[in-house]
Amino acid sequence: MTRPGYGKVLVTGADGFIGRALCVHLAGLGVEHVAAVRAIAAHDNRPEARLALGDFAAAEWQDALIGIDAIVHLAGRAHVPPNRAEAATPYIVANVHVSRRIAEAAARANVRRILFASSAKVYGEASHPDRPFRVGDPGEPQGAYARSKAEAERVLREICGAHGVELVILRLPLTYGPGVKGNFLTLLDAVAAGRRLPLARVANRRSLLYVGNAVSAIETALTAPLASEDALPIADSEVVSTSELATKLAHALRVNPRLFHVPAMFLRGTAALSGRGAFVSRLLDSFEVDASRFRQLTGWAPRSSLDEGLAATAAWWRMRHML
């Protein structure tokens, strides 16, 4: 028996950062769900039903969707090896082709709703310091990853619209929490190690999303009577500058922040010469999204504050390093 108000849910990317947290959350709610993964590890003893499908681009999705009411589509590719970072094909296959096959199978299986986790990068790489990205803003995706997410959104709208499948697109900013990887973990490691970082007085504005808040937003979007055809950005309540984030991380890790000031122009120039221009731009530029439309439509509000999310992340980091 599943919880009233929910049908059976299939979660793609259930072994990923958000997927693992979502499956734990759904289990706690008593929501019947299936974790769709590429392979099941021999030591994996998690309680939810798990379905190993191999290569998602060649999987038999039709059989996997029998009896499924809603799909949370989290699977995709966010990173490729550095020497192939701008190669479009891996992103097109993982993010566009797989989404198309899932949507086509969902239409045939009479799935009620697909919830697609897209990226706020579809809006662009930087927001204006005085204006966040909002629902309805035109997309200006830069790079193969963001363009593939924009194309996946288009494909899903086309198929779901033609077959009467409800579609919810959530655009997520940088998401953090226990188990985080990528640039956030790089910053976390640097702060924890007491490295001196040239981030003092960086006065940008960045939206973040704690994984627990992401999971609660997805839970809400599974059943809320959403009528928006627009992609909906979601984020934590607070906006933070990079210097504030580094300071808050230091406090959560119980270390002293070691920040010093270097003019932004000098940082950008040095980074461009060393091939790290894109990484430094992410630290210096603003990237803010306005999540008010999703809140208005659903009544959702983030359950955890930024400080609470950072505290949980720091606790995970300390346990990981046995400190």
Image (cartoon, rainbow, N blue to C red):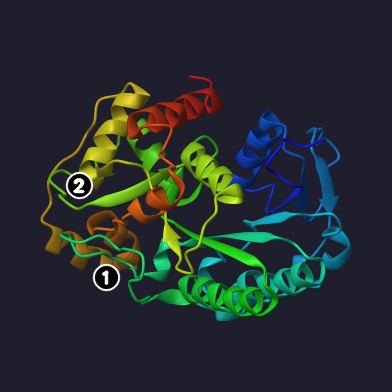
Q: In the picture provided, is 202 more to the left or to the right than 253?
A: left
Residue 234 vertical placement versus 265 (above, below): above
Q: In x, y percent, where is residue 175?
A: 45, 47
Q: In the rendered structure, which amino acid carries the disc numbered 2?
A: Pro
Q: In x, y percent, where is residue 203?
A: 15, 50
The first of marks 2 and 1 along the sequence is 2
User: From the image, which quarter does the N terminus lie in?
Assistant: top right
In the foreground, 296 or 214: 296
In the foreground, 95 or 111: 111
- The residue that mark 1 highlights is 273
Dividing the picture into quadrants, the one containing residue 126 is bottom left
Q: In the rendered structure, which amino acid carries the disc numbered 1?
A: Leu
Q: In x, y percent, where is residue 287?
A: 29, 58
Residue depicted at x 39% and y 38%: 188
Dividing the picture into quadrants, the one containing residue 220 is top right
Residue 255 vertical placement versus 92 (above, below): above
Q: Which mark is residue 198?
A: 2
Q: In x, y percent, where is residue 185?
A: 45, 43
Residue 205 vertical placement versus 138 (above, below): above
The Cα–Cα distance between marks 2 and 1, rounded to whole angstroms, is 17 Å
Dot 1: element: helix
Residue depicted at x 52% and y 34%: 178
Name the outermost residue toward the right.
63
Q: Which mark is residue 220?
A: none
Residue depicted at x 36% and y 25%: 253
Q: In the picture provided, is 220 more to the left or to the right than 208?
A: right
Closest to the camera, between mark 2 and mark 1, is: 2
Q: Residues within 10 Å of mark 2 (few under 14, many from 20)?
A: some
In the foreground, 304 or 109: 109
Q: Is residue 180 visible?
A: no
- Please say if the residues under marks 2 and 1 sit with CB atoms less than 8 Å apart: no
Q: In the picture provided, is 189 more to the left or to the right than 17?
A: left
